[in-house]
Amino acid sequence: MNIRRLVVLGGTGDLTGRYLLPALAALHAAGHIDDRFTLTAGSREDWDGERYRRWAAAQLERHGADLPHDAVRAVTAACGYRKVDVTDPAEVAAVVAGDDPVAVYLALPPALFAATVTALHEAELPHGSRIVTEKPFGESLRDAEELNRLLADVLPEQAVFRVDHFLAMTTVQNLLGSRLANRVMEPIWNSTHIAEVDIVWDETLALEGRAGYYDHVGALKDMIQNHLLQILCLVAMEPPLTLGERDLRDRKVDVLRSVRRLTDADVVHRTRRARYAAGRAGDHDVPAYTDEDGVDAGRRTETFAEVELELDSWRWAGTRFRLRTGKGLGRDRMEVAVRFRPVPHLPFAQDEDVRPNVLRFGLDPESLSLDLNVVGSQVKKLTQVSLSARMDPPALPAYGRLLLDVLRGDPALSIRGDEAEESWRVVEPVLSAWERGLVPLEEYPAGSDGPPRRHTPERREDLLHQDAVLPQ
């Protein structure tokens, strides 16, 4: 059943202005929603509908300048507004009231999810309604379990959309396409042939005024616990029977369950955390993270996080998966880099200099490349070439695809309740060890490559024992 009524709680926030409103305009331009669609925004500001429509128009002009004017005007006209305390059941009930089913989008800080879901329970949503939650889903495993219990009291699991816009990115989905639709790929997609997989989201962007959210979350919760673990699932999952919601999500949960739990010793040797100091990124100076407006230095929030994981499964025993993210770095690098093991024998003079084959899925911009060793201009001398392709631009932005799935009722690209809990199970040992100070909080100058990599003897020996290719 298609839904034509969307309520966004937190409707004046950055998420709504930067992503949701442009996504709705893109859906209108593509013919997926029409003039019967309505959007009601709820927030704390003492606004009326006209004030909100002016705000929405300004956001669309800023973040959707390339969208058709007719679509922008239609979405702006569809907007309404209600002042609401999202923890007050009576006020929430007034916002969602109506006979038709409604999709309620919680564009809120995670700390408000439980109280808001409780209020929605008392509001008694119309039959066929749906709830959408943003990441991170709770703030710990215990939070996620409690939130799942609350949501189960309101709506059935298939009506709950725990969205992660990374899953709607074209290149992320092409991870599955490259594996499952190409005969040459799947037979070598295992630890026999793959030494390491790097899943990286490095940004030159620094805090940019997001201290109110980011300083309470940090890089590990903001990126690795959800986005990068979701990509890990698509890289490592067994081929599903179909791409339907049950088969796809079952296989993703299998991956998360197979992640070997990190001990304190593992966390010390296989994780890093750091925050940026003052530096220069591109053509502008960047203040130290602790000098950014709204930052509490006492929280010791990390802006860089790296975690190395191993999977206890037949396919992946012996392969390292490295998940890394950072802000204020010297270059943007958003990719999945699959490093293959060396061939068993090379009849060339400089065998020791041969570089590994690397298959790269560029996430932003979307691209695909493969590094291959070939014979160069000198006889019997190898060189490396890169075969690359840029992907066609997606028909819809990632949030447009997610909203379309919500409105149509297709949960395949949303995160199931047990999957959200398993993601927390993976990172909780890291959070615990970091909170106890077992891993130092390093610093790196803004505009650099991040903190220097540590190579302890134990770690190098372990990698070499697994025949992995050490990073250059």
Image (cartoon, rainbow, N blue to C red):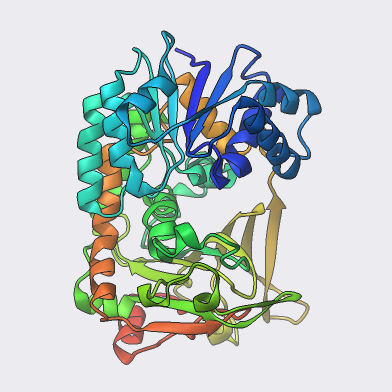
Dividing the picture into quarters, in which one does residue 160 lie? top left
Dividing the picture into quarters, in which one does residue 379 lie? bottom right
Q: Position of residue 247 (x, y in %)?
A: 33, 32
Classify the position of the C terminus by image quarter.
bottom right
Classify the position of the N terminus by image quarter.
top left
Q: Position of residue 408 (x, y in %)?
A: 48, 20
Position of 154 relative to 176 (above/below): above
Look at 42% across and 70% down and name the residue there: 305
Q: Residue furthest bottom?
A: 457
* Residue 30, visible in the rendered structure: no
Position of 70 relative to 288 (above/below): above
Q: Position of residue 144 (x, y in %)?
A: 25, 46
Q: Position of residue 234 (x, y in %)?
A: 42, 47
Look at 74% across and 25% down and name the residue there: 73
Look at 48% across and 26% down and name the residue there: 7
Along the horizontal axis of the image, is 67 left or right of 409? right
How many numbered marks are there? Answer: 0
- Between residue 203 and residue 310, name the one nearer to us: 203
